Image (cartoon, coloured by chain):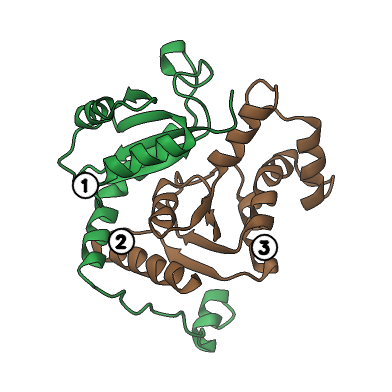
Amino acid sequence: MKIFIDPPNSLILFDLVERSGHEPLSTMAAIQEKIDRTEIDMPPMNLSLEDVMLGLKYAGIEVPSGVRGRLAVWGPMIEAAEAAVIMEDCPYSFGCVGCHRANLMVRYMIKRKNIPVLNVNYPNNEDEATDLVVEIREFLEGLK
Amino acid sequence: MSAERETRLIVISPASEITPDQVSRAIHAMGKNVTVKESCYGAVVEGQRDIVRQVVSEIKSMDPNGVFSKVRAYPAGDPRRCRAHHGTRPGFAQLEQEWNDLWKIQYGLDRADRGEKARKRKTPGKLPVGEFKKICEVKR
């Protein structure tokens, strides 16, 4: 199954989802397609016209361009997702820190999609890390 | 560049006994048609998707809970990202943060393999009215 991970660039979540035999939907894979297929200078910093139009699908024109640019990458991933794993209470420097509004919009879109969602806490010690690993494993095994 | 290209970061947990040198030597010894770049956190592997995945799974078998991997968007040595070409590395802060946490995840995976269960989470209860008033500074 295709699992959306939030933060979408997380190594820990990507690896744990892949270990369970599912396909993680990550920012890296989405940007790789843009690097390989489109002739633009430095994605995701530079966009094509298609990206701009795609961003407008998820947020209005009055919304800051940064939110729309991020949603142009994450929106199609959320649409393709069959389940999601969200990490909460992360430190400030963890994940995509550029725009909190875009992150809130992602949570809202996941909620509206009505797919199975697991909310886990960021592990601050060994016990919390065990909880995180076990919870993710049980959730993903239950999806099969 | 082919759409079948895959670039993978192999990241070694700080608690693992494997070194980046061992990883890159092991990949070279496999004799597969992939590019390997040794780095401080592990290695970058690039090549055809199925071959790269095969290489990553073989490397993970060296230390199943101590080696982690994720996809990287830019190719290895790309001048827009490679520091040798004065490229920017906007993703390195995230990678560094997660590398610092990998020992905890490794510990968690070891314990999960031994069959440990997750502790019950404390669900946040309702806020009593008295406390809420104190927060709002309504009660005088």
Expressed as whole percent of the image width and height from the top left, the position of residue B86 reads: 46, 13
State the count of labels: 3
- The subunit letter for the residue under badge 2 reads A
The residue sitting at the right extreme is A61
Q: Nearer the viewer, residue A127 or B43?
A: B43
Marks 2 and 3 on same chain: yes
Q: Nearer the viewer, residue A45 or B140?
A: A45
* Callout 3 secondary element: helix
For marks 3 and 1, give the one nearer the viewer. 1
Q: Is residue B140 visible?
A: no
- Where does label 1 land, which residue? B63
Question: Which residue corresponds to mark 2?
Answer: A129
Task: Provide residue A59's location: percent of width, then percent of height.
Answer: 78, 50
Q: Nearer the viewer, residue A89 or B42?
A: B42
- Tell me residue A71's x, y (percent): 69, 47
Q: Quick check: marks 1 and 2 in contact, CB under 8 Å? A: no
User: In percent of the image, x 57 and y 71: which residue is there?
Assistant: A116
Kindly indicate whether the residues beneath marks 3 and 1 are on one polypeptide chain.
no
The residue carrying pointer 3 sits among few (fewer than 14), some (14 to 19) or many (20 or more) residues within 10 Å by Cα, namely few
- Taking the spot 31% from the left edge, 58% from the top edge, the residue there is A124
User: What color was chain B assigned in the picture?
Assistant: green
- Say what amino acid the circle numbered 2 marks: Ala
Q: Quadrant of residue A38?
A: top right
